[in-house]
Amino acid sequence: MGLPRKVRASLLVVAVLLAAVGCGNSESDDGAAQAETGGLIGISMPSGDQARWITDGENLSYQFERMGYTADVEVADGKPAKQIQQIQQMIDSGARALVISAVDGKSLTGVLEKAHEAKVKVIAYDRLIEGTPDVDYFATFDGRRVGVLQASYLVDALGLRNGGEPVTMELFAGSADDNNASVFYKGAMSVLQPFIASGRLDVRSGQTSFSAVTTKAWSDEVARQRMARILDEYYQSDDLDAVLSPYDGMSRGVLQAITAAGKKRPVITGQDAEIESVKLIASGKQDQTVFKDTRKLAELAANMVKTLLTGGTPTVTDTTQFDNGVKVVPTALLQPVTVVKSNYEKILVGSSYYSAAQVGLAS
Ligand code: GAL
């Protein structure tokens, strides 16, 4: 990203030509030179609608170019077929490695077989790629912890550990085609389930199973519609006290439905520290988000690729958890952080993730 597509395409052609005549750092006929850095890296992001993936693409591109590689970032617009086509194109253009955040984690088996045949290394970036042996490593955040942080925030904010009257809550999970959605939800439910079982938490819709609460494509609009239906059906005469939301975009959709129904604002969580939600947190309209420093994730993934392409073995932190149905994918996990009104400035502005002006603070 950053550069217009035509410029990127021309850069790509130059890189491929240089490689063909044996210039620059690109590979030559000498096996040892394969260990050099340089050459093309394909970066495949799932969607441009959710703010973070654009930034992730830019961060990855920055890291690879800093290391001497050429980066081609493509965005699949939420369409699995488009992503497959873009990845195939990257393989055909001679990519040495692919960093992929899948639209649909189970849709890439065929194209990754082609990558494997072409000896292209594959890193799953923040979303597990499932049902294929042709994924080398996974770079992500501790997703179970994301869910635990969201649910723990709700438990504390609602004072659930103190006895008291039942408190109402509705539950939302992410997209069923993204393995993260169930990981976050399981983490959250490990904290919330005992309160539901004891009756302290009342999920009035009765929708608590993962399949009942998923949200196609993590869509704000799908979340808004479901929230509106639930309010209409179960909260005609009451306010809803709290909402477990796994992602900021969905939180904003839920809040729209609440406003439209004229209800009191529930306590609500989120994830990604998207700029629009950080502003809502600053102005007291959303309570919490989970910050995942995607600059660090991009650096981690780029280092994995460099290590692999220079003949090394990347360091991982988990070799048991991420079974993709065919293999356990060796994984490096980063830790997420809870962000609320009292710490957003320190965590997000203090680390220069956002400028003071971006989050609406006087700079
Ligand atoms: C997930 C990711 C979340 C959020 C969501 C919607 O895979 O882990 O951080 O970005 O997608 O884009």
Image (tube, rainbow, N blue to C red):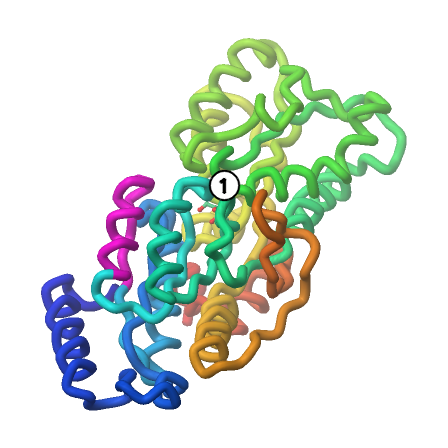
Judging by the rendered image, the residue that carries numbered circle 1 is 178
Position of 156 with respect to 95 (left or right) is right
Q: Is residue 64 above or below residue 157?
A: below
The N terminus - image quarter: bottom left
For image coordinates 74% across by 25% down, the residue present is 167
The structure residue drawn at horizontal position 62% and vertical position 59%, both measured from the top left corner, is 336
In the rendered view, does 292 fall on the left or right side of 30?
right
Q: Is residue 252 magenta?
A: no
Residue 93 x, y percent position in the rendering = 21, 65
Residue 354 found in image quarter:
bottom left
Q: Secondary structure at mark 1?
A: loop
Magenta run includes residue 82: yes
Residue 325 vertical placement versus 340 (above, below): above
Foreground pick, 241 / 71: 71
Residue drawn where x is 51% and y is 62% of the image: 136
Q: Which residues are magenta?
A: 73-91
Task: Kindly tell me whether mark 1's CB lies below 8 Å from ligand 1.
Answer: yes
Q: Is residue 55 visible?
A: no
Percent of width and height locating residue 122: 43, 62
Q: Is residue 362 left or right of residue 78?
A: right
- Taking 311 as reference, is 153 left or right? right
Residue 306 picture location, percent across and down: 44, 78
Mark 1: amino acid: Asp
Residue at (54% x, 60% y) in the render: 138
Q: Quadrant of residue 194?
A: top right
Judge by depth and name the residue closer to the eye, 184 or 314. 314
In the rendered image, residue 301, in percent from the top left (x then y), is placed at 48, 69
